[in-house]
Amino acid sequence: MSSNNEYAIQVQDVSKIYKLYDKPIDRLKESLSLTHKNYHRDFFALSDISFNVKKGETVGIIGTNGSGKSTILKIITGVLTPTSGQVRVSGVISALLELGAGFNMDYTGIENIYMNGTMMGFSKKQMDEKLPDILEFADIGDFVYQPVKTYSSGMFVRLAFALSINVEPEILIVDEALSVGDVFFQSKCYRRMEEIRKNGTTILMVTHDMGSVIKYCDRVVLLNKGHYVAEGAPGKMVDLYKKILANQMDDLEEELLEMNDFSGGMDSDAAGAGAKGASGEMADGSAAGAGADTSENAAGTAKGQDGAAGHAHKKHSGLMKDKLTINPNRTEYGNGKAEIYDLGMFDERGNLTNLLLKGEYFTIKEKIRFHDSIQSPIFTYTIKDKKGADLTGTNTMFEGAEIRPVKNGDEYEVNFRQKMTLQGGEYLLSMSCTGFEQGEHTVYHRLYDVANITVISNKNTVGVYDMESEVEAVLKPAGSGNTESGNV
């Protein structure tokens, strides 16, 4: 592998193979076999994985359980040796892998701090200088003088993370470490990670928190069952990951082919419902999608199919979507049993528009045509920010709407009405028709980022949405018993 000063980590054609034996005696038989007969089968934890991490970059590795995320981190940090391939690391690594790695359970917290500091190449004097910051960050009090085997898991991760993040690493590697600890400690960890990221530290992280992936990562590597799938912008990779979660690999392979052919661009008509296999849904695996929709009346009315019925991309006259700004590069997929053939957004005055006023009620309308019988369809929508993070949403199952079974040719018209409390800005709308078949979550038709929503506001507050606070302020002038109150 050639050296490149641009990269902090270079992974080239790395494979990790484990030998699996059906019975313990088979291992002995194989070692004593004069004919070198194999009694094992090979399990590829990693298969020819290659990617690079630039210096100062924050890269996430995502994938389902068993995809090889933790294995590749252990190889990069030297905990494991690859069966084949090469890893080149340029810089001092501070790694926070699984709980317990690098700590002696019989040592006190203080002793473990100095022992791990020495292993990372720091002198006792240097660790003396860093110790106050580590102890302040960990905030575990006098427990730091007790053996770590007496710690709770939360105390342990506080100390381990405090050590890893306060030794000024050139490369920080984190594997699901922030899933332990209360929300306040997690928030402090992310703030500190943001600080060291801005100072040029390279961060490689594994997490199942897709919101953190989108917020903190510059780039994401997607793995599946030990294989490299793709890498790119966080929002795009999270969408591909959702397809894997729903076990819709045919659609994923088609999208990857299109990404390779068109440099990441998506042709929505080439990915229409009925032409593709069903794909994944939510990052948390919930039915009908991460953040599916908020609705005061998620109501659906079944209709008989009329003469306007057609195929997924047949041109219809007088469609609502023809009067909206629709994303030409949207992603859509599904198994073809249902088709969201029209959609609309209406403001409080009934105008069909992409422009909505903060503080007013608005309605999202979906029209769905069915091409097969479905016992319990679920209708969803999700609003995301420009980075792809789910902000809000709901679905008819969450809202308890009465949805009846449908047959080929039926139609549903579904209205979601809610108040716009998002701050002024640009957002993306996704929607889907999903359900369960034999207990498996199934996507009949999903439209990712199908339309933009522009929220107009004359008063933005802090954060993503407005809490609609009512403020009362009372003034008591100095030296006076009088009070003046003002309501805002």
Image (spheres, rainbow, N blue to C red):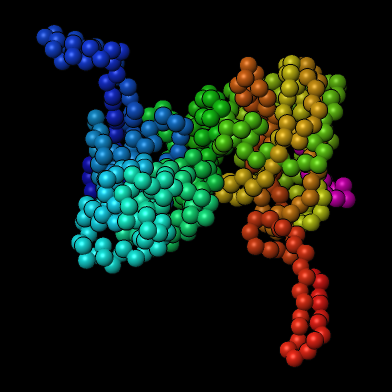
The image quarter containing residue 403 is: top right
Residue 21 is left or right of residue 446, and the answer is left
> Residue farthest to the bottom?
479
Residue 399 is left or right of residue 79, and the answer is right
Query: Is residue 488 visible in the rendered structure shown here?
Result: yes
Location of residue 101 in the rendering, given as x and y in whole percent from the top left corner: 31, 43
Location of residue 56 in the rendering, given as x and y in whole percent from the top left corner: 37, 56
Query: Is residue 272 visible in the rendered structure shown here?
Result: no
451 or 245: nearer the viewer:
245
Residue at image x 21%, y 15%?
A: 27
Residue at image x 81%, y 28%?
A: 402
Residue 331 is left or right of residue 213, and the answer is right
Residue 69 is left or right of residue 318, and the answer is left
Residue at image x 76%, y 28%?
A: 368
Location of residue 117 in the rendering, given as x and y in whole percent from the top left corner: 25, 56
Q: Quadrant of the N terminus?
A: top left
Q: Which residues are magenta?
A: 342-353
Residue 351 magenta: yes
Residue 67 magenta: no
141 or 478: nearer the viewer:
141
Q: Is residue 85 above or below residue 335?
A: below
Q: Quadrant of the C terminus?
A: bottom right
> Residue farthest to the left?
34
Q: Is residue 18 above or below residue 351?
A: above
- In this rendering, the count of numbered labels is 0
Location of residue 328 in the rendering, given as x and y in whole percent from the top left corner: 65, 40
